[in-house]
């Protein structure tokens, strides 16, 4: 198969015949296609994903579809998103080695990527739902975010390279449009594809959608998202885009990659830990989850701490781009000036991160794409109780983000809301 053939979606039945001559795939799993075992595992919103096992090993084949898989062909979507995913993965591997799956082959015409099969890794969200307390995720994710976000920005990159990269990823228009609408706008009015736990949350949803301060803040955050092309983002960094073992953490699925605000990835990621926190009440069939709740809050503290520490380290050691040049500060004997600038930047990241986290919570409960953290709670009343608390939390941190000064404050608010008996 070559990229010049017309696009055709793969299937379990056709994959071996169509990829049997692909040298990259054969070199990893073996050439004897009669021994290949193919299974489809794609349970995401957009793509086909297959695990292909052969005599020598296994690999993952991921293929984009010309529409949103969650909705169907009534919502067309460009195949080029696989191009952006491929280029994002190569940059993430260079900037944070070992943090993403290795790429074996990319076929732009067929919109497919053949990549490393991660085993025995599982999706982080599943692990958290199961109550697993993984020791390394905060450190690994904090380092990944700091390294990719710093090294993909004008703080580090050569100006020509950074502008060329910005131009390349600027064409990821369709997936940016999904984020701009599904995250920042649709949850705050009765959009066609919205859904929520009804009737239990009806009054709370109506209250949120009538909240002028919240809607204005959501649009201010949308403005920041659209206008601040600070760095190359993962663009969809949540607990469903991370694969884990007890000792290893890998980030996957960066097809939403584009240049945006540093705070966006951080906010989306931490929002997912806070949603996991509020969902724990729905997973207490086999006993209390108090230790799991404490663990999740600790993870948010460590993730932010590691991110902040590593970002600061890179600021001091790898600030080679056009912004805040050392020639203006350290080279003039003004190290404190550079530290002052760093403090201003981290404060802005902190403030915007809280806002992005708040709207991410809302869209995962009120919009189209929901989290399994809540969706797997079978009892609708119990699910609504968990969701109502998360919605209140999201509103508080989004609207009051300028008055919140530490991660401990945020977690105290989460713990306070969790103890309430609303709904």
Image (cartoon, rainbow, N blue to C red):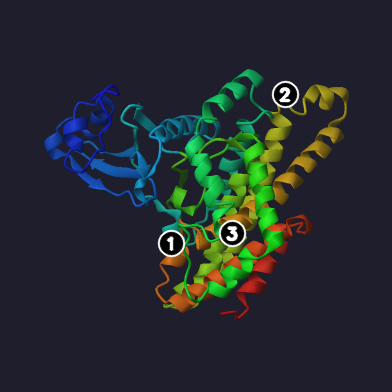
Position of residue 270 relative to residue 283, above or below, is above
Mark 2 vs mark 1: which is more N-terminal? 2
Of 134 and 232, the residue lying toward us: 232
Q: Which mark is residue 322?
A: 2
Whole-percent x and y of residue 18? 19, 31
Position of residue 284 relative to residue 44, above or below, is below
Of 297 and 386, the residue lying toward us: 386
Q: Secondary structure at mark 3?
A: helix
Quarter the C terminus occupies: bottom right
- What residue lies at 63% left-to-right and 18% top-to-bottom? 160
Name the image quarter holding residue 301.
bottom right
- What residue lies at 72% left-to-right and 24% top-to-bottom? 322
Relative side of 37 to 298, left or right? left
Mark 3 vs mark 2: which is more N-terminal? 3
Of 206 and 99, the residue lying toward us: 206
For the residues labelled 2 and 1, say whether their Cβ atoms are less than 8 Å apart: no
Q: Secondary structure at mark 2?
A: loop
Residue 291 seen by the camera: no
The residue that disc 1 covers is 372
Q: Distance from label 1 to label 3 (Cα)?
A: 21 Å
Q: Secondary structure at mark 1?
A: helix
The residue that disc 3 covers is 188
Of 168 and 68, the residue lying toward us: 68
């Amino acid at each position: 198969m070559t990229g010049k053939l017309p696009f055709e979606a793969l299937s379990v039945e056709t994959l071996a015949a169509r990829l049997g001559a692909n040298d990259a795939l054969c070199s990893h799993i073996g050439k004897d296609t009669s021994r290949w075992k193919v299974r489809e595992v794609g349970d995401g919103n957009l793509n086909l994903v297959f695990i292909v096992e052969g005599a020598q090993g296994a690999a993952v084949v991921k293929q984009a579809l010309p529409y949103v898989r969650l909705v169907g062909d009534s919502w067309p979507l460009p195949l080029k998103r696989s191009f952006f995913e491929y280029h994002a993965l190569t940059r993430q591997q260079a900037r944070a080695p070992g943090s993403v799956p290795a790429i074996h082959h990319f076929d732009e015409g067929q919109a497919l990527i053949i990549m490393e099969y991660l085993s025995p890794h599982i999706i982080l969200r599943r692990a958290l739902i199961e109550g697993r307390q993984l020791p390394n995720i905060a450190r690994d994710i904090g380092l990944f975010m700091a390294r990719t976000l710093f090294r993909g920005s004008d703080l580090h990159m050569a100006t020509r390279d950074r502008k060329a990269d910005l131009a390349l990823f600027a064409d990821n228009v369709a997936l940016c449009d999904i984020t701009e609408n599904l995250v920042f706008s649709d949850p705050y009015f009765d959009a066609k594809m919205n859904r929520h736990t009804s009737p239990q949350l009806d009054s709370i949803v109506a209250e949120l959608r009538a909240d002028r301060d919240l809607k204005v803040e959501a649009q201010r955050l949308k403005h920041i998202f659209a206008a601040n092309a600070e760095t190359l983002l993962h663009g969809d960094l949540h607990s469903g885009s991370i694969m884990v073992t007890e000792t290893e953490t890998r980030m996957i699925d960066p097809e939403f990659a584009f240049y945006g605000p540093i705070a966006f990835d951080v906010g989306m990621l931490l929002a997912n830990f806070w949603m996991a926190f509020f969902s724990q009440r729905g997973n207490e069939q086999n006993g209390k989850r108090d230790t799991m709740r404490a663990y999740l809050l600790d993870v948010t503290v460590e993730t932010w701490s590691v991110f902040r520490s590593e970002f600061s380290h890179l600021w001091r050691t790898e600030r080679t781009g056009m912004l805040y040049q050392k020639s203006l500060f350290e080279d003039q004997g003004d190290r404190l000036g550079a530290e002052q600038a760093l403090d201003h930047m981290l404060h802005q990241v902190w403030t915007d991160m809280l806002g992005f986290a708040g709207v991410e919570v809302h869209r995962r409960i009120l919009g189209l794409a929901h989290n399994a953290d809540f969706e797997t709670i079978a009892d609708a009343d119990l699910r609504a109780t968990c969701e109502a608390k998360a919605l209140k939390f999201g509103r508080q941190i989004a609207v009051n983000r300028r008055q919140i000064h530490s991660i401990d404050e945020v977690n105290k608010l989460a713990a306070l809301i969790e103890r309430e008996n609303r709904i």
